[in-house]
Image (spheres, rainbow, N blue to C red):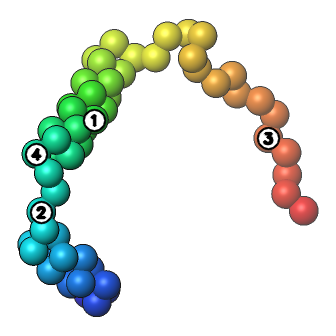
Amino acid sequence: MINPRHFIRMARWARRPPSRRMVITVLIVVGLAAVIVGIERTIGWPEWMQVAPGPIRPTR
């Protein structure tokens, strides 16, 4: 179920939509994120960016 705050936000957004510049900025950020994910999925992480597995400490 949708939170009632979302209805208020949608109504405000319908009355005053974001500027063209904001839409382009968001699309660029989403596009860059998609490119990074695509590169990571096809090529993988470099060795220096991988986390070395350490000992697992039991929780108390």
22 lies left or right of 39: left
Q: Amino acid at mark 1?
A: Val
Q: Position of residue 57 (x, y in %)?
A: 85, 45
Residue 38 visible: no
Q: Earlier in the sequence, mark 2 or mark 3?
A: 2
CA distance separating discs 1 and 3 = 36 Å
As drawn, the label of residue 47 is none
Q: Amino acid at mark 4?
A: Arg
Residue 35 visible: yes
- Label 1 or label 3, whichever lies nearer to me, is 1
Q: Which residue is denoted by mark 3 in the rendering?
A: 56
Q: Earlier in the sequence, mark 4 or mark 3?
A: 4
Q: Secondary structure at mark 1?
A: helix
Label 4 neighbour load within 10 Å: few <14, some 14-19, many 20+: few
Q: Which residue is denoted by mark 4 in the rendering?
A: 20
Q: Which residue is denoted by mark 1 in the rendering?
A: 29
Residue at image coords 16%, 57%: 18
